[in-house]
Amino acid sequence: MTGMNNAMNPGSGSAQKESGRADQKQSQLQRIADGEWFPPVVDPAINKETAAVSIKNFNLWYGSTQALFDVSMDVPREKVTALIGPSGCGKSTLLRSVNRLNDLIDSVRVKGEMNLYGDSIYARGVDVIELRKRMGMVAQKPNPFPMSIYENVIYPLRIDGIRDRRILDEVCEKSLRGAALWEESKDRLHQSALGLSGGQQQRLCVARAIASEPEILLMDEPCSALDPIATGKIEDLIDQLRGEYTILIVTHNMQQAARVSDYTAFMYLGQMVEYGATPALFKKPRLKETEDYISGRFG
Amino acid sequence: MNTEQKTNRKKSARSWRRQSGGTSIASLGQPMVWLAGGMLALSLVMIIALLLLVVVRGMGTFWPGDIVSFTTVTGETVAGEITRSSSFKPRPELVDNLPEHEQAKARQMLAGNDGISERVLVRTGNYELDNNHFTWVNDFTVADTDYPQWLVVMERLTWGRFYGVPREFHVDGNLVAEGPSATWEQFEQHHRQVRQRWQQRRQLESHDVGKINHAQEQARLELRSAELALQEARNQFGARSDQYRQAQLELDQAESLFAGKDEELNRRYDEIRARIAELNRENDRYQITLETANGQLKVMGLSEVVRAYPANQLNLLDRIGIYLDRWCEFLLDDPREANSEGGVFPAIFGTVVMTLIMVVFVVPFGVLAALYLREYAKAGPLVSIIRIAVNNLAGVPSIVYGVFGLGFFCYLMGGTIDQLFFSEKLPNPTFGTGGILWASLTLALLSLPVVIVATEEALAAVPGSMREGSYASGASKWQTIQRIVLPRAMPGIMTGMILAMARGAGEVAPLMLVGAVKLAPELPVDGIAPFFHLERSFMHLGFHIYDLGFQSQNSEAAIPMVFSTTLLLILIITMLNIGAIWLRNRLRRKFIVSAF
């Protein structure tokens, strides 16, 4: 962590200086669009936290198009971290890189380092399947499997070959309670999950993601396909999970980021622009560009 | 200023509208709607017309009609059932050949009808007496039309139908009844028992004798394999070796065993023959004498007659009874008279069993192939070429599959199996000739592209989000396929199976080469171990239709059977499909209900 600290501080300082200059000439965001790279402005408070996932100089290409540029960030343990930024800024790509879901796309190439509690994610010979079992993921659109609610929740255990009915029942109840879905679904556990409403389906996906007690929970715009009431329920759920799970959440919705997250990272065109504690970042961002984006003047 | 601009814009918009003269017809797309709808209607009309033809003619085959008796101007009598009518322009000689005094009348009748005559085709039967099953009767030669009360139809085991008036009934050569009604009464009284005895006899012949034959063949094969072992021992170890002497001993044992078995079996065979002879003797006691419309007498044994009825005395209920009875015979009995009469049960059985075996082979094979193509193979030119090749396989003429099946399955694979496992039966082939297994495999190959294409589409339609959800839960690729992709794609795979079934069950050409035959009363599944005899040749409804329509001696009588058999084939395929669709809908309800 200390090494990181050293690397970041001079960077943030120069970025501030440069942004000061940019006020007169060109904003930093425009210069990013023109292909310049700026080191991210990072709140030193983050460095006091234990990192669950640490990302160092991570680059990613879709074929010949680069989508992530030297991204570095630490995701604090048992905190909610939000990734915000305009469409196409690479926040979903970054999230999907954490559990190597981008491997499914043939043309993807990566460079850089990523660690989960010190275990390298991208090193040669890493068992991707074992790695993914340590993480849970909630996708943009609810994606329940075509099976019963019960089977959906215990799917991660099923693929591990666990057959003990007692364990399965226990995990199912615990996960559904954890996802605030138990009361609604306990009488229909063995009916098809596809009969649930959209919001319930998304909470079911959360239940499935936490069933294997992951070390980190990845959420890729979990509310973008939901109505405000269902969104509220998911946000309450995230609030309940705070302190228990490390959560990395991508969101389009600034208010949501402000409501649910402890830390927020602002990304733009594949670069990390500013990363800091949520209240500070939303009230008094270090960069003017971040303020512009948050207040809706840009993006 | 502002309002002025607005009105200006409105005006200009309106003038633009006026220029184009409103919305054009082309932009509404109305003609295309009509064209598309018209095409659909046209195809529907064609399909419905075809189905109607098959249904109407197929249903009508077994209806017992009246017996007409025509007396012609030359004094002949033609009696029988009218099968169809047509109009034609008679050649002048036809009229010239009539007796002098009738010519004028006939000419007058023809002139009144623009020289066109109506004629009817009468099924006269009585083939052994006049060498004709059917006779055309022209309207201008008919002097008298009559529906005689006592003309009866006799459906017989051989020679086709007989039309005549019952005259005398003999038991043991003694006259017991005379005159139509008394004779008919006697006939009805005895016929049922005689038929029961006949059924008993047939049961003995086919079942019990069949069993003995099978046992005899088995014993012969055991002896033969002992002989082969002896030969083998001599070739390998020489005539002086211990092995040879051992084999010689075994052969002697086998011979004495065979002699014992053979004697026992022959004794049992003689017993059965005696019982059959007794039944025959009992049946031969009853004889009926009939008089044809032309006054010829015919003596007939009662066991010859399958079904008889006085057609012109029947009320509607009787007719319905006979109609249903004939349908039952059609569905449940073996064919007789070169397939033009009797039932098609072996063909129904063969068709269904062959289709099911085909499905059992083609579905796993096609699904696994599609799975590799879609899920594992890296997209590239090779995969594209394979995909094109698979699609083009669907365009290969089916007879080519038949030739391939004969060469590869029957001769190569079957021949090898025979050499390895059935050497004692050689040179008679067991698997080395057409059979239901090879026919099913050939059709499986033929319908493989259908299954592969449908499965690939079904796999491609599984949402990526579901796969990602599974991967994100830590599932491996195979676990994802097995637990998420395949269940979700199952309804689509079932659709492929349904299409393959429809394609395979209706195919005939390749079957002619790989095992479908005219007549195979031995079913591929029966009570003799090992119960499934997949090497046997079989009957198939499609081939049966071809055989009836184009190979039959008595083609006029066979035509209605063609329609009935076609109707049956359509019904069977429909039923198989409905079964599969029902299964698919169950799966679909389970897997693809969505709240969105």
Image (tube, grey):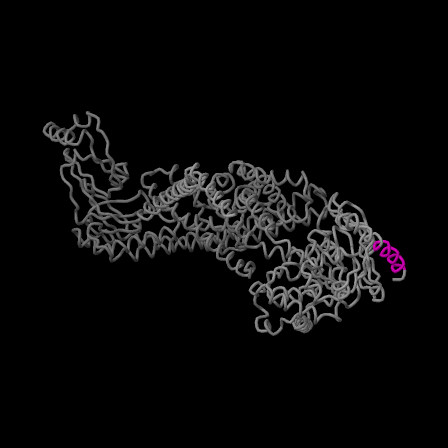
Magenta region, main secondary structure: helix
Magenta-drawn stretch contains A12: yes
Tally the numbered discs: 0
User: In the current view of this chain or complex, which residue is farthest to the front?
Assistant: B1
The location of residue A118, given as percent across then percent down, is: 84, 61
Work out whether residue B286 or residue A55 is closer to the camera in this orientation and state it. Answer: A55
Q: Is residue B584 magenta?
A: no
- The residue under the point 90% across, 58% down is A6
Seen from the viewer's position, the closer of residues B159 and A293 is: A293
Left or right of B78 in this view: B30: right
A116 and A276: which is toward the camera: A276
The picture places residue A145, in percent across and down from the top left corner, at 62, 61
Q: Quadrant of residue A4?
A: bottom right
- Looking at this view, name the residue that lies furthest to the left: B101
Asked where in the image residue B474 lies, by quadrant, the reply is bottom right
Q: Indicate the position of residue B243 as horizontal and vertical percent values.
A: 71, 48
Inspect this view and state whether residue B275 appears: yes
Q: Where is residue B109 in the image (x, y as percent from the top left)?
A: 14, 32
Q: Would residue B309 be found to the left or right of residue A103 on screen?
A: left
Quadrant in which the N terminus of chain A appears: bottom right
Q: What stretch is highlighted in magenta?
A: A3-16
Does residue A145 sit above or below B404 in this rendering? below
Residue B354 in sight in this render? no
**Which residue is painted at 68% across and 55% down in the image?**
B478
